[in-house]
Image (spheres, helix red, strand yellow):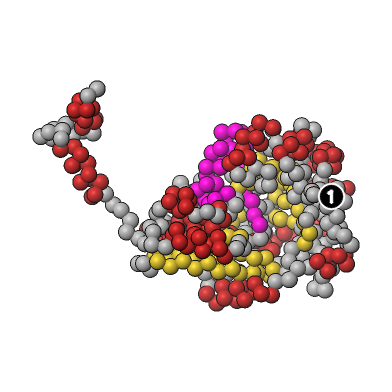
Amino acid sequence: MGDWTRRRWIASAAGISGLAGVEEFPRVFAQNAADRPRSRMKISGFKATPVASPDEALLRSSGVHETHFRRTILELESADGFKGVAETTGRAPEEFEQARSVVLGRDPFELEHFRRNVKSLHAFGAVETACLDMIGKAINRRVVDLLGGPYRDGMRYSAYLFFVLPTPQGPGVTTPEGIAKQYSEFRRKYGFTSVKFKGGVLPPDQEIEALRRIRADHPDAKLRIDPNQGWSVETSVRVAKAIEPLGMEYLEDPTPGLDGMAAVRKETKLPLATNMVVTRLEHVAPGFQKGSIDIVLLDNHYMGGLMNCRYWAAICEALGWGCSGHSNNHLGVSMAAMTHMNCAVSRVSFDADTHYPWTSRDVIKGTLPPFKEGVMKLPEGPGLGVEVDADKLAGLAENVARMKDRKELLEKWQPGYPNARPGSRVRF
């Protein structure tokens, strides 16, 4: 087809064959493009503030939480006065300095430009969330609407149970009985009917007993355990077979590596979930080929933003993997962002993780709506539906200098903890 004929065909297909000449088509097309609505917003303010909120002495396979958990609050502002906020991990300031040079002076709608040019996944995830918050406020729509609309109006979350190191402030939680009681309290207070139990702390038989006690007390509870790769393949298989009769939802990251997970998966009926061995796109093909996992825990902080989590969910759906939502310690900005994401992504079919009930001091104005029967409703306001309280932000920023580890208390409680095998996370 010659160039003149091709242009005539395009003009006809576009419904403009009645023009005096097809040579007019490029001019008309360009004029129409110029008339289309276009954002004129420009990002003029960029502020990343490290903060630290008090934390309980929560135990995990690799040690104990510090006196505070650290986060970074990102605040963007446009030249016409719209603001956007995000929260991410407590990353190094230089990651946000690089992001600042990419973002300032650009339109908040230029998310793909930011995705390609902000080097840190954590920083980009924060930039994207803050831009979506700003855009939502500018057009009076919620972030969930910008992600494709709400598949659900509220997200069901899971209780997050931990053994707690004894401290001068309290006796802690260090027994199966204590874990079962902790869940009963969370269920009474928040209505959680799902249980994520952070294992890999006590000898596996005691953690099996904790799950058995929860099941005896709450026959309808949906149970999971996550030892953070603290078990060998042999221990993982033994524990899996012991807890299969409890009707577990899944077993999360019992052992290190794709090969280790695949070896466990061959020996148990329990689905295996992860937020540790399939966390980058380059992990997907080998994870699928080896048969290592069944469920991916989505996390907008670690997977490059809210929209990237939608891409991850589509990949999981294509491969037949399920999706849940992941959580580290977080504040109310992340609680809102996670809820928008989990409500927008239909593939998230398991109750999502959240540390939020462990959070005692926040940066947001007022408080988020409470959990009701285990559900966090979508915030009602535009954007994320939350705003940062400047005084609270300043107070938590001052806490960064007050952070201390709890190594001495941990050594006093159990000398040598965590006793991981040399060169490995494996404890048991």
Q: Position of residue 49 (x, y in %)?
A: 55, 69
Vertical order, 303 against 295 (above or below): below
Vertical order, 216 against 322 (above or below): below
User: Residue shown at 55%/55% (left/top)?
Assistant: 120
Q: Position of residue 27 (x, y in %)?
A: 18, 42
Left or right relative to 385: residue 302: right
Q: Is residue 326 magenta?
A: yes
Nearest the camera: 81 or 178?
81
Disc 1 packing (10 Å; few <14; some 14–19; many ≥20): few
Vertical order, 331 against 296 (above or below): below
User: Residue shown at 56%/42% (left/top)?
Assistant: 312
Left or right relative to 277: residue 203: right
The secondary structure type at the circle numbered 1 is loop
Q: Position of residue 340 (x, y in %)?
A: 52, 53
Nearest the camera: 92 or 133?
92
User: Residue shown at 12%/33% (left/top)?
Assistant: 21
Q: Which residues are magenta?
A: 303-328
